[in-house]
Amino acid sequence: MKNIKYFLALIIMSVLLIPFSITKADITKPPATVNDLNIQIFEEIKNILQTPLYLNYTDKNLKGETYITISVIKDGKISVTDAKGENEMLNRYVIRKIESRNMWTDPAYTGKSFTFKISSR
């Protein structure tokens, strides 16, 4: 009976302490130039779009091209400001995928914009 109490206490303590070891922030090196920021955003978008589709899309026709303009707005928030392409479903899909990430950068880059061509086949 005494061993069961120790075992239960060990399980409870591990459940309480595991989240503190897992929740370390993913700290990356801040971009030194606008070109570095462009590369970081490109890599982030590439990673975002490789994740599976959202289940709320009834029309799976996501073929075509879209041009996404991403800007650094007030306080360093990175946001999609424009999406142009013939396939509206693809445009909305890309905007929602990018906006699902909470991307931020140094506020010194406020006002900078980047345009990316996204092709889906």
Image: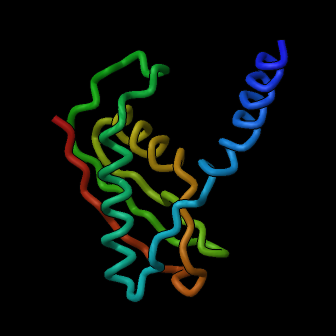
Up the image or down, 118 lies above or below 39; here it is above
Up the image or down, 95 lies above or below 117; here it is above
Q: Residue at x 37, y 70 (%)?
A: 114
Where does the N terminus fall, quadrant-wise?
Answer: top right
Q: Please identify the residue farthest to the top as the structure is shown.
A: 1
Q: How many marks?
A: 0
Left or right, residue 12 beside residue 98: right
Q: Residue at x 79, y 26 (%)?
A: 6
51 or 27: nearer the eye?
Answer: 27
| Image location (x, y in percent) of residue 106 | 56, 80
Colour scheme in the image? rainbow
| Image location (x, y in percent) of residue 60 | 32, 21
**Quarter-of-image position of residue 40:** bottom left
2 or 13: nearer the eye?
Answer: 2
Left or right, residue 119 beside residue 62: left
Up the image or down, 62 lies above or below 31; here it is above
Left or right, residue 30 beside residue 86: right
Q: Please identify the residue farthest to the front as the structure is shown.
A: 2
Up the image or down, 91 lies above or below 109; here it is above
Q: Residue at x 60, y 48 (%)?
A: 22
67 or 41: nearer the eye?
Answer: 41
**Quarter-of-image position of residue 94:** top left
Where does the C terminus fall, quadrant-wise?
Answer: top left
Q: Residue at x 31, y 71 (%)?
A: 39
